[in-house]
Image: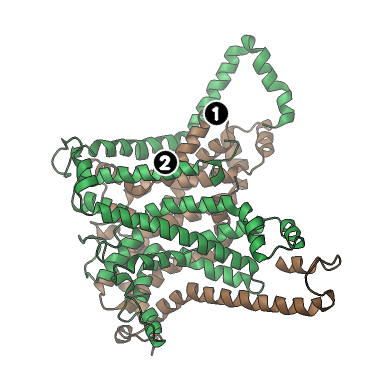
């Protein structure tokens, strides 16, 4: 859009310090220099962001002995490292656990948060502002603040430690961050749609399911993605509740043990790292729009 | 709150005819209140059970001696005194957390804004650059940390190989108490994607006419940024700072994993190791809560520390409630 600002003023010549006659050439040169400078910086930045992936990948296909050297480029491409990682006892279980935690967690969160967000966005009732403040406060709260009594309840009263259920079950009761994001999105749905649905005789529940949910699909997709990744990436939760039982570990939690189990072999650890990163990045390419939408939603206008 | 329908029926009925149809109206009110409660119920239950209860219990346990085996014992303020005045690790943990809050958040905001500005200036290959800058944000924190510990390892890490090839005496990064936190900052800058997108959206929202007007007034690049861009993006910057502070106070996974891996201890997770390698330089308050509560089984002290964290987090959050941070709309 800077191009338009540069070309647009030409008919009505901008007051300028330079001699008008030499303007076109000078401007063209300036613009070219500007282009080169911007793209040089962009390429440098891109290297900073991309090179770590490249090095991790290159190391992940090195042989055991080469991975212990300082070499950057693999002599031979050991794709078998990946099959070896996948065949490591437990690795597929971690995958399954991660999928269960993230899948069920997302489903529960979305189903329980939509009605709450809808009420906070569209109903008028006393205490709404307070409710909003409480939602935002819980959203900002470090999980470590309440983890100890929660752990004691799950472990001593309900005997569910050693599994991921203490992490999944609470998600059936609304998640503050998802409620907040969904509400921000629902605020943008014009009232008229909801009112006309009511005129047509829809109850609140039907209005929500038939009118609001279909209109809020982009917002719901963004929230679902965020929640999925939150669960997929979660380390603290599985550490608290699943540590004693390797059968319940998730990928994020198990990955750390990789370096320890294969202590000298960076190549195996890097192959495992790639396998943990890959699903997230693949999903991103399929759902790019929902992602960006979600991130912008968090910083929405006041 | 639309103006036109307000003049017509419902409010008028509400005010003038109240005595006659009061029961009916009351019934409607009750129905509406029940409906609201119904929609809010998942959260009301969740908030009470998974937030209200544990918060009160944390306060309760902070006055108890409790090792999670024998019944809790009331000890008054002893846990508080122990944590705040005697516990040797409290100081370093609080210092590290505050250090990260200040340095990491400041650098992330500046860097995120820089990258956001850069993206808006790029004319060829925007799509490629945007994706390249964004993707590291998606790397799961544990995976990203493992990758960085490898990249920066002093023995065979590619970064130090490259630096020594051009004759730079490279630091030991995660293995050096002075460099461990800066290394974590670098890791967090690598995952700048979220801020980049927010800033990019804010920058594209600045009205173009304002730039044109400023250009006509002869404003240079800096003046344009100072007088046009900055005023219109301050709410987003403010938002990024406050949420950054809140996130950094919870900083746990990366610091823990980096410390554990760099220390070279070859045992799986679940085994007891003192966090904070090297030399407590990566020990944060949340890690200390974990250590006290789940490794030392000193429930009382862990709860005191949790409450300290809670108070700081609430103080910061109250900043968020201000209108400028843009979380609550004027309507609320």
Give the position of the N terminus of chain A as an image quadrant. Answer: bottom right
Q: Position of residue B63 (x, y in %)?
A: 21, 37
Give the position of the C terminus of chain A as an image quadrant. Answer: top right
- The furthest residue to the right: A11
Residue to which mark 2 is pinned: A173
Q: Nearer the viewer, residue B54 or B185?
A: B185
Drawn side of residue A168 relative to residue B276, left or right: right
Q: Position of residue B222 (x, y in %)?
A: 64, 64
**Total tally of numbered discs in the picture:** 2
Badge 1 sits on which subunit? Answer: A
Q: Position of residue B11 (x, y in %)?
A: 67, 21
| Residue drawn at the location 45% of the way across and 78% of the way down | A54
In terms of secondary structure, where does tag 1 sit?
A: loop
Q: Nearer the viewer, residue A196 or B212?
A: B212
Badge 2 sits on which subunit? Answer: A
Location of residue B260 with respect to B67 vertically, above or below: below
Location of residue A24 with respect to A292 vertically, above or below: below
Colour in which chain A is drawn: brown
Sequence-first disc among 1 and 2: 1
């Amino acid at each position: 859009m800077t191009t338009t600002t540069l070309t647009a003023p030409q008919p009505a010549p901008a007051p300028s310090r330079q001699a008008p006659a030499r303007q076109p050439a000078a401007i063209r040169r300036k613009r070219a220099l500007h282009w080169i400078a911007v793209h040089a910086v962009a390429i440098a930045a891109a290297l900073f962001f991309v090179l770590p992936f490249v090095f991790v990948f290159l190391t992940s296909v090195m042989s055991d002995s080469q991975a212990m050297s300082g070499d950057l480029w693999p002599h031979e491409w050991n794709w078998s490292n990946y099959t070896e990682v996948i065949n490591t006892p437990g690795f597929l279980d971690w995958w399954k656990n991660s999928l269960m935690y993230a899948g069920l967690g997302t489903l529960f969160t979305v189903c329980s948060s939509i009605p709450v967000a809808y009420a906070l966005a569209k109903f008028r009732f006393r205490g709404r502002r307070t409710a909003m403040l409480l939602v935002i406060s819980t959203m900002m709260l470090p999980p470590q603040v309440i983890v100890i009594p929660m752990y004691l309840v799950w472990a001593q009263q309900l005997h569910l430690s050693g599994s991921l259920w203490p992490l999944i079950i609470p998600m059936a009761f609304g998640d503050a961050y998802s409620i907040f994001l969904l509400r921000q999105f629902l605020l943008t749905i014009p009232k008229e749609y909801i009112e006309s649905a009511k005129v047509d005789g829809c109850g609140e529940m039907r209005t929500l399911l038939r009118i609001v949910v279909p209109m809020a699909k982009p917002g719901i997709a963004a929230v679902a993605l965020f929640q999925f990744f939150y669960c997929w990436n979660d380390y603290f939760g599985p550490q608290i509740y699943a540590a004693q039982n390797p059968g319940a570990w998730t990928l994020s939690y198990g990955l750390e043990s990789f370096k320890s189990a294969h202590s000298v072999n960076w190549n195996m650890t890097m192959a495992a790292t790639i396998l943990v990163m890959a699903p997230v990045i693949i999903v991103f390419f399929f759902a790019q729009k929902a992602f960006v939408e979600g991130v912008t939603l968090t910083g929405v206008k006041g | 709150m639309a103006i036109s329908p307000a003049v017509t029926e419902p409010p008028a009925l509400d005010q003038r005819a109240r005595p006659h149809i009061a029961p009916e109206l009351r019934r409607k009110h009750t129905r509406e209140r029940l409906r609201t409660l119904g929609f809010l119920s998942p959260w009301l239950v969740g908030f009470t059970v998974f937030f209200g209860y544990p918060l009160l219990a944390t306060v309760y346990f902070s006055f108890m001696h409790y090792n999670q085996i024998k019944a809790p014992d009331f000890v008054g303020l002893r846990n508080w005194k122990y944590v705040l005045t005697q516990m040797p690790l409290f100081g370093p943990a609080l210092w590290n957390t505050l250090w990260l809050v200040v340095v990491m958040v400041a650098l992330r905001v500046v860097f995120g804004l820089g990258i956001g500005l850069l993206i808006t200036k790029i004319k060829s290959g925007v799509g490629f650059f945007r994706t390249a800058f964004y993707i590291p944000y998606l790397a799961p924190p544990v995976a990203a940390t493992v990758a960085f510990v490898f990249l920066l390892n002093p023995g065979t890490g590619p970064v130090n190989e490259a630096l020594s090839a051009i004759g730079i005496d490279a630091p030991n990064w995660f293995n050096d108490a002075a460099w461990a936190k800066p290394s974590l900052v670098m890791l967090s800058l690598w995952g700048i994607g979220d801020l980049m997108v927010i800033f990019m959206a804010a920058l594209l929202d600045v009205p173009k006419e304002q730039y044109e007007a400023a250009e006509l007034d002869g404003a240079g690049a800096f003046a344009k940024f100072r007088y046009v861009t900055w005023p219109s993006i301050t709410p987003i910057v403010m938002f990024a700072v406050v949420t950054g502070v809140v996130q950094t106070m919870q900083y746990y996974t990366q610091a823990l994993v980096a410390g554990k891996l760099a220390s070279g201890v070859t045992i799986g997770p679940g085994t007891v190791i003192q966090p904070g390698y090297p030399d407590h330089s990566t020990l944060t308050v949340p890690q200390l809560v974990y250590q006290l509560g789940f490794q030392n089984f000193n429930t009382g002290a862990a709860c005191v520390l949790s409450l300290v964290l809670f108070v700081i987090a609430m103080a910061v959050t109250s900043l968020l409630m201000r209108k400028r941070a843009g979380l609550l709309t004027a309507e609320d």
